[in-house]
Image (cartoon, rainbow, N blue to C red):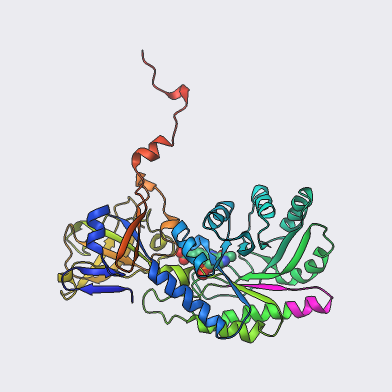
Amino acid sequence: PSLQTDVRDGLMFEGVPLHVIAAAVGTPCWITGAGTLRRRADSLRAAFEARHLPVSFHFAVKSQDHQATLTMLHQCGYGADIVSGGEMKRALAAGIPAANIVFSGVGKTDAELRMAVEQDIAQVNVESVEELYRLDQIAGSMGRVARAALRVNPDVDANTHDKISTGRAGDKFGIEHARAVSLYSEASGLRSIKLVGLAVHLGSQMLTAQPFRLGYQRLADMVREIRSFGGIVESIDCGGGLGIRYRDETAPAPEMLAGVIAETLGDLDVRLSVEPGRWLSAPTGILLSRVIETKAGNPEFVVIDAAMNDLMRPALYDSWHGILPVAPQHFTAPVSPRDVVGPVCESSDIFARDRALPDLERGDLVALLDTGAYGAVMSSTYNSRPFATQVMVDDHRWQIIRERQTVEELIAAESVPDWIKPRNA
Ligand code: LLP
C-alpha cells in the first residue's frame, strides 16, 4: 500500500521516487518506510485493544534493530523483546524503559544476566533449569532479586520452515513443558528469583490459527496446574510470530491472534504480552539494487549488485521475495522468466528462479520487497562487501540513517601480528 507507481518517476515508496535515492546514495541500499511501521504498530495494538485484553507489546528487536525503528516503536507504545546484551543496549539507547524490556534466548552469558539484573528489566525468560539457578546465583551475588518467567517448550509444530520453528520438542528453546510445572514450585524456594509467570515462542511466519490455539491452550492448562499447587502466575508472554504474505500466502490478521489469545488465556486474570517482529517490520523494508549485467542464455540471468551477504533469507531459507522493476517503462512491458542472482561466488547467492520480469538491462533498478525483517540485521561482509547504506522514507521525506560502510573501515578494524609483518631488509 505504501508503494506507488508514477508514470514519470516510476516506483515510489512513501512518496519518494526510488530512482532519486539510488542516484543520491548508490546501491545496494535498504529503505525503511516509517509510515508503514507506524501504521502497522497502531493496527496491531488496535486489534488487542478491541478485545480489552491487558496486553503489553514488545517488539522483537532481532527482526530490525535500527535505532530509528526502536525509537519510533517506543513512541507507538512498544517495549522490546531482546535476545542479547547488545539488543538491550540498543533498546535502552532508544529510550525504551527497562521496565518494558523482556530478555529471551538459550545462551545468555553471565555478563548479560548481570546487566539484566542491574538494569532491572521487566523479566528474564529463563530457558533451562541450569539458567534459572545461574540467574539466582548472579542476582544473589548482587544483592538483588531478578524477575523471571519460565520459557516453556510447548511441543507444538508451527507448520513453518524448519529453520524458523522454535516450539517443537526437539528444538533447542525453552523448558520441557512436563518439567516446567514442577520447576515452577521448585523455583519458588529460590531466594533471588521472583517468578512472575510463563513464556513461550511457538515459531515464526505462522500462517494459521491452530498452532497458536494449541500452544496457548497448553499454557493455560499449565497455569491452572501451577495454581492448583499454590503457585502464583501473574504474567504470560505469548510469543509466536504472525506470518505475512510474501508471495501468495493467505496471511492472518492480528485480529486472529488477539482472538485466539482472548479465547485461550483471556479468563486467567494474568498480564499478557506479545512479541511480534516480522509482522511489524517485514513490510516496512525494501532492498534497492541495480542490474550489473544480464547474461543471455537459458535461463537468462539478471545479475544485480545486492547479494546474499546483504539479504541472506533466500540462500538460508529458500525464501521468496517480490521483485519489482523501478522504471516506469517496465511496468507494462512484456515479461518472461529470468533468474535474479547476486555477484557472490556461491550458487546459493540467488534471489529468484524463473521470475516473470521485463527485459531488464544493465543499469536498471529493482526493488526486493518485504525485506524489513531479518534483512539488514542478518547482513555480513562476505566477499569483502561492506554493509549497505540504510535510508528512511516518511511522507515524501527521506534521510540516510546509516552510511555505507567502506572497505577501508573493514581493513582498519584488522591488525596483522608483528611476526608476520613483512620486514624491511
Ligand atoms: N520472540 C522470540 C523469543 C523469538 O525467538 C522470535 C523469533 C520472535 C520473538 C519474533 O518472531 P517473529 O514475530 O519475527 O516471527 N531469521 C528468520 C526468522 C527467525 C525467527 C526466530 N525467532 C527469518 O528470516 O525468517
Q: Is residue 162 visible?
A: no
Up-down: is 291 above or below 284? above
Residue sitting at 53 percent across and 70 percent down?
276
Residue 414: image location, x then y, percent: 44, 35
Q: Is residue 139 visible?
A: yes
Residue 298: image location, x then y, percent: 20, 64
Up-down: is 77 above or below 127? below
Q: Nearer the viewer, residue 247 or 29?
A: 29
Residue sitting at 66 percent across and 84 percent down?
266
Quarter occupied by residue 151: bottom right
Up-down: is 193 above or below 141? below
Q: In this image, 140 relative to 297: left or right?
A: right
Which residue appears farthest toward the top when viewing the image?
A: 425
How many marks can you see?
0
Segment colored magenta: 223-239
Residue 155: image location, x then y, percent: 64, 73
Q: Is residue 225 magenta?
A: yes
Q: Nearer the viewer, residue 143 or 169?
A: 143
Quarter the C terminus occupies? top left
Quarter the N terminus occupies? bottom left
Residue sitting at 71 percent across and 63 percent down?
148
Q: Is residue 289 magenta?
A: no
Residue 397: image location, x then y, percent: 31, 64
Q: In this image, 286 relative to 39: left or right?
A: left
Quarter occupied by residue 354: bottom left
